[in-house]
Image (cartoon, coloured by chain):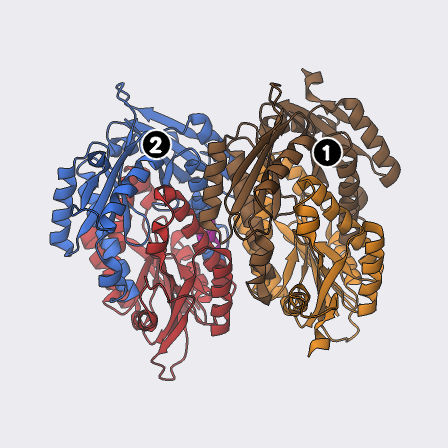
Chain colours: A red, B blue, C orange, D brown
Amino acid sequence: MIQLTLIQLDNYGPWTELLGEDRESDLQIMQADIYADLQRMFALRRGLVFFNRFDNMIAVSNGVSVKDHEMILRSVGRRYPVSISMGIGSAESPFDAQVLATKALQEIGSAQSETRKSIIAHRTNDNGEQEYVQIAHIDINGFTLRVTDRESAYQSTYVVYSSTAILMRMFADKGALLFFNGGDNFVSVCNGLKKSDFKEIFDRFETSMNLKLKAGIGFGRTALDALSRANEGLSLIREKKTDEVIILKEEML
Amino acid sequence: MIQLTLIQLDNYGPWTELLGEDRESDLQIMQADIYADLQRMFALRRGLVFFNRFDNMIAVSNGVSVKDHEMILRSVGRRYPVSISMGIGSAESPFDAQVLATKALQEIGSAQSETRKSIIAHRTNDNGEQEYVQIAHIDINGFTLRVTDRESAYQSTYVVYSSTAILMRMFADKGALLFFNGGDNFVSVCNGLKKSDFKEIFDRFETSMNLKLKAGIGFGRTALDALSRANEGLSLIREKKTDEVIILKEEML
Amino acid sequence: MIQLTLIQLDNYGPWTELLGEDRESDLQIMQADIYADLQRMFALRRGLVFFNRFDNMIAVSNGVSVKDHEMILRSVGRRYPVSISMGIGSAESPFDAQVLATKALQEIGSAQSETRKSIIAHRTNDNGEQEYVQIAHIDINGFTLRVTDRESAYQSTYVVYSSTAILMRMFADKGALLFFNGGDNFVSVCNGLKKSDFKEIFDRFETSMNLKLKAGIGFGRTALDALSRANEGLSLIREKKTDEVIILKEEML
Amino acid sequence: MIQLTLIQLDNYGPWTELLGEDRESDLQIMQADIYADLQRMFALRRGLVFFNRFDNMIAVSNGVSVKDHEMILRSVGRRYPVSISMGIGSAESPFDAQVLATKALQEIGSAQSETRKSIIAHRTNDNGEQEYVQIAHIDINGFTLRVTDRESAYQSTYVVYSSTAILMRMFADKGALLFFNGGDNFVSVCNGLKKSDFKEIFDRFETSMNLKLKAGIGFGRTALDALSRANEGLSLIREKKTDEVIILKEEML
């Protein structure tokens, strides 16, 4: 069982239209501020927020109680001119959990509803399974040397966004989620995936993009615990302390 | 002539490795803070910054002097544990301008150099042309109704990231740049493109993604001036005051 | 028993000297950012931070564990070019608690030590008493009407800073602490003070400043719980639902 | 002639009452965020903002045009749930300039008016004098060694706030302004004051507080230019390159 939270700015599109034509830089600043704020607040509860599309963010929220969600929602609503609503979903696979989180929110009202405001909704298909988080930290091998220092900045970004789209699909096919995390870094929320699943995805990715991936995979009761373990694994590869390109931290114990 | 600035965090990857395994949420907060900060500072000079990959940001910087760049670079360097370097490029097409900006920076040193720090480098292929900025604000028709309110959050994001990758390539083929700007919004820096170029791209996009795009296109001496005009155009379409799906603001005068 | 935390920027003065003459605005931004950050992180643990002198902040930290302190300290150290150290003190009176917190930190090294960095130190005179927080929210009667809307901005500020200095001394004489909180608002951390103590202070303040004060006083296991109760009391006075000028929330139950 | 801007949060007090009892930490975060934001935006125009009472801030705004003020006002209004209004005053003495700035704003409406919102008002007693800024950066001699490292944190703060109140009055008596700037630092906006004025104030301060002050004083067309020169002067004293305790940077030329 993993718990995911969909965080949606309430009626955001129509609101931005009210701000005048000169608004774009202010919107970008505010979106980044809200994301940083949410990250800070979820992180203190050992959760992790992905910026995703900025008006729709996704958090791994195991260990973050409903009361914590309410406190975070209220804090944002007080300090910004827009409010947020949240859908919380729990399921065995990360993909199913975000489906439930989305449905919970969609049932309450449209993202552009004028009346839906500061709502928290839940959905779970709880079957009594144990809660845990499995996370992989993935990057592209030698990206700085091979791409950033050689190609144009736009071309490098194109490689990363194309890679993101391809990986998003391949992970979803296995019930997992993949988020771009800046630079050439990806984080996959991947409860239930085996090392062989990663190997298969990485091989297919190499075939289509001619780039090699590496990954540390970690488990934990919370997102930050799992990601910390994943980072330990990735560091071993980066520091060439192993020949593997996929490290499941359990194996190292 | 358009002027673009590549903003690169100095030796960022290796630095993050020093922070301990538990670092990810702090990195995400800091990356968003630096982006918001840069946006705020460039915007006061009527420039516009795209978050791009967060460790590599791209700004449209017409009207932002080298001295302004230096002040911004120094302000970031004082308030964060990482410094930034900047490459400034000027060319007739946006694509060429970012190539020059990248080369200017690459010549000074690698993105992971331990010695390159707080540098500003320039490159121009100035042929005496007039400086101006052409920008398009693009979004997907009925995205909230058709996708956000209907599909899962992850699926919606997948549509947006796939669209970004496809559009990035199609705009680059015409010498322009395309950036994802949150939600279902894209901003294209597109000096030299005609309405017919947009029509062609939008038609091909609809064929491959089964989604319709609309755009306002504006011109100006600075990024924010151009984008404000673009927003005026897009508002006309959104408010159904025109049947066109591509508005060049000159036409409305 | 109340727990207070002294948060001190490490070797801050000498560090600022390295930044060049043009540094002041950047320092002011960074100081405000660090304070806002700390407030956000302590608040999630129901603590409260006072900006105090900005390079030395004081937090009411009942309920914030040493592990929480460490996480907060690490998060700041990663995202800013300066680090913080913390002294934690517990005592029966707020005044004694801050003395212990200060001593704990002073024993480790000077505020301008080049070697003291990211340290947490503790001191308690625990005698088994129950932990709780008593907080008063105080403001000046009719300040907007009588001062802000009538006097010059500087004169209004002078009234507030003079009031702060006078109140700081009077509360300290009773073992309590008083912090200026913006506007014409003061927050007193005042475990052990009775309503009669407030009455005495307010009468003496009126004599010397010719201004009347009002206060809500609350109790709780944490700073935010106590302050919420205090705000309930102050609201009753502001809304003229009571003739009292000092409300201890217990009385209302 | 110096230009000062009074920045006032519109109808702030009544608005905070709407947020629920649990609001204080969010208000503190937002106040610090708004201040940091304003500082960043004014600083790019070489202005300088003092946090003052947080709901009423004062900026030295020579060189910041009315159009710049409007852009800053709009940017804040878009990104926060509260708006700001501004009064701009120009006069020969800083004290008179803030009086005019305040009056300009007071005439438009009360700080707690429900209708006054996002207004900019001006007042000048322009007599054709040249615009310039004179600023002093002042600190207390050996404060870390003598006070911070020796006294309790609260006692140190009491010394600083008492000093602030005393200095505010003494500078106002000479037509100048004094702001607390964090730590043991004060900034005086002091057009027209001579070195002998500082000497007199510092002597009287030493008599009443038993603490010695030192100061660098600078001149410039803008606040940041003047403050940079002032910092050069103060650095000479701090590094013991002079026996003087008051350095007017002109003297060093």
* Label 2 in the same subunit as label 1: no
Report whether D143 appears left or right of A57. Answer: right
Query: Observer-nearest residue: B109 or D12?
Result: D12
Left or right: where B103 falls relative to C97 = left
Q: Position of residue C122 (x, y in %)?
A: 72, 62
Report the magenta stretch's main SS. helix
Q: Name above or below for residue A49 compared with residue B82.
A: below
Q: Position of residue C200 (x, y in %)?
A: 85, 62
Residue linked to disc 1 = D138
Residue C45 at x, y percent in the picture: 59, 66
Q: Is residue D129 visible?
A: yes
Instruction: Residue under label 2, please give it.
Output: B222
* Residue D81 badge: none
Residue B29 belongs to magenta span:
yes
Where residue A85 sits in the image (x, y, percent)? 40, 66
Amino acid beneath label 1:
Ile
How far apart are the two marked residues, 2 and 1, measured between alpha carbons?
41 Å
As helix, strand or loop, the secondary structure at mark 1 comes to strand
Quick check: is D204 in the magenta stretch? no
Q: Does any portion of residue C135 appear in the rendered image?
A: no
* Three-letter residue code for mark 2: Thr
Does residue A23 lie above or below C248 as drawn?
above
Q: Which residues are magenta?
A: B26-30
| Quarter of the image where the N terminus of chain C is located | bottom right
Q: Quadrant of the C terminus of chain C?
A: bottom right
The residue lying toward the viewer, choosing from A69 and C206, is: C206
Name the residue located 53 percent from the left edge and 46 percent from the top edge: D84
Q: Are marks 2 and 1 in contact (CB under 8 Å)?
A: no
